[in-house]
Amino acid sequence: MKLFEVENLSYKLGDFKLDNINFKVNQGEYFVLLGQSGSGKTLLLESIAGFNSIDGKINFEGKDISELSPENRDVGFVYQDFALFPNLNVRENIMFSGRYKQIENPEETLHDLADFLGLEPLLNREIDNLSGGERQRVAIARALFSKPKILLLDEPLSAIDPTFRNSIMKFLKDIHRKYNLTTIHVTHNFREASYLADRIAIVMNGQIRQIGTASDVLNNPENLEVAKFLGFKNILPSSMLNEDSGRLFSVDPNTIHISKDELKNDYVFEGKLEECMGIIDHYKIFVKVGEEQFFAKLLKRDYMGCYADRGESIFIGFDKKDVSYL
C-alpha cells in the first residue's frame, strides 16, 4: 500500500538542481536512494524532511505535507554525522522530541528503545564519551522516540568501521522490522543497497534515473550511464550477438565460462587471452574477441589455474539469461 509519494519535486541550491523528482514508497518498505557523492541524494532526503522549500508536492497518507515544518511531518531523521546535542546526555538526546511533541508513555518508550539498542548502561553518559557506534545508536533512538511513520537515514554507515558494517546492516534491518517502519536510506554503497533495500532509486545529477527492486536495478541497468555507475563490465555492441538493433549489451563477468575446448553456451566466441591475473580468491581474465575485450572472473576453488598463456586462443561462452541490454 502506498504511504508516501514525491511528485515533480524540484529544488535549486546554487548551481545544483533537483530536477522533477517522482517516486513512491510503500508501507513497510525499505527504500534506498543510491548515488555518488554530489548526486543530490542527501539534498533530496532533506527536502523530504522539510528542511528545504521545494517546488512540487510531497504526499503522505494522501495529504500534501510539502508546506509543513519538519517537526510536523511524522518523520525521524538520522544525519550522517549523527548531529547529537553535545550539551545533553544520552537520555536527554533520545527524549528531545518530547519537548515539542506529546509522546505517549515516554519512559516506557525510552527504555524499550534503550533495551533493544543496547543503550541502558549509557543513558546518563555524556555524548563526548561515546564511540562512533554508540553515537549512531543514540541518533537512531532519538529519531525513533517520536514514533515516526517514516525513518530517514543519511549515509548511516559512513562513519562506521568497515569491520562492523555487516552487523550494523543487520541491526538496521532488525530496527526496520521491529518498529514496523517505512525507511528511506541514502547511500553510495552498492553492497549496503543490495542487502537492505526492497527497492532502489538511482540518483544522478539531481535526477532519478532508474527505480525498481534491488535485484532488477543492480543487475539490469536501463541505460549506459547507470550501468557505468554500477560498475558494469563488458559493455559491448549487440551486433556481436547477431542483432542489428544498435543497442549495447552487458554480461556479468561472473557468468562467463572459459575453456580451451568449444563451449555449449547460447553465445560462444573464440578469442585471444590477453591477461590472467591471480587475485586472493579468484582470477581476473581478459580475452580479446575481434576489436572487443571481454572480462571474466573465475573462482580459484573452481579453476586452479589459467587455461592458456597470453596470446593463445581460448573460448568464452555465456547464456541469454545472463545478458542485459542497455
Image: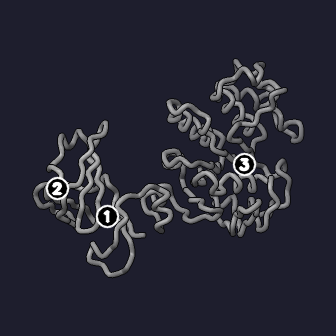
Q: CA distance from mark 1 to mark 2?
A: 30 Å
Horizontal side of residue 22 vs 209, given as left or right: right
Residue at image mark 1: 321
Query: Is there a contact, CB below 8 Å, between mark 3 and mark 2?
Result: no
Sequence-first disc among 1 and 2: 2
Q: Position of residue 326 (x, y in %)?
A: 43, 69
Sequence-first disc among 3 and 2: 3
User: Which quadrant of the structure image shows residue 98?
Assistant: top right
Instruction: Name the mark on residue 149.
Output: 3
Kind of residue at badge 2: Gly
How packed mark 2 is, by other alpha carbons closer than 10 Å (few <14, some 14-19, many 20 or more), is few
Residue plotted at (46% across, 63% down): 221
How packed mark 3 is, by other alpha carbons closer than 10 Å (few <14, some 14-19, many 20 or more), is some
Residue plotted at (64% across, 54% down): 38
- Reply above or below: 277 against 314: above
- Circle 1 SS class: helix
Out of 144 and 292, give the one closest to the viewer.
292
